Image (spheres, helix red, strand yellow):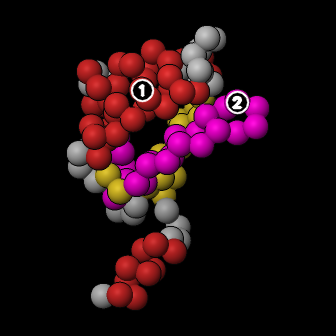
Amino acid sequence: MSATIEMVSFKLNDGVSPAVFIKASEELDNWVGQQNGFEYRALAQQEDGTWVDIVFWQTQAHAQQAGDAFMTAKESQNLMACIDKNTVVMQHMPVMASLANQRIKDMA
């Protein structure tokens, strides 16, 4: 099994400011960080207002387990309320190469 990148793109609901969304995202950080297989998470915003949430997982199975748990976790509810569900696109991709992993291997 290989490491997996989860990439979710979406737009915010009308009337939701970036500041409100980022606060809701920060409320979720502790929960995400405690999920099995979690490695790294970053949020970015494209010029057209689309947000991209990128999470690195140890395996595809870890990504799937966390995704399933996310939908019902109380910690995710404020974040989900900010997102226009009709704009959500989720992708999972195997990591083919990683500079961070290579540096870790070199240090071992």
Residue 97 position in % (x across, y down): 53, 71
Whole-percent x, y for residue 87 in the image: 62, 22
Give, as a single range, the part of the protein colored magenta. 40-64
Q: Position of residue 33 (x, y in %)?
A: 29, 46
> How far apart, in angstroms, are the residues tagged by discs 1 and 2?
17 Å
Quarter of the picture containing the C terminus is bottom left
The residue type indicated by label 2 comes to Gly
Name the image quarter holding the N terminus. Answer: bottom left
| Image point (23%, 45%), residue name | 34
Q: Which image quadrant is residue 67 in?
A: top left
- In depth, the one of 72 and 80 nearer the eye is 80
Residue at x 35% of width, y 87% of height? 107
Residue 81 left/right relative to 58: right
The one nearer the camera, 94 or 37, is 37
At numbered mark 2, what does the secondary structure look like: helix, strand or loop? Answer: loop
Front position in the image: 39 or 15: 15
Asked if the residue under mark 2 is in contact with the one under mark 1, i.e. CB atoms within 8 Å, the reply is no
- Say if 83 sits above or below 40 in the image: above
Counting residues from the start of the chain, the first of labels 1 and 2 encountered is: 1
The amino acid type, in three-letter code, at marker 1 is: Ala
Q: Is residue 12 magenta?
A: no
Q: Which residue is mark 2?
A: 49
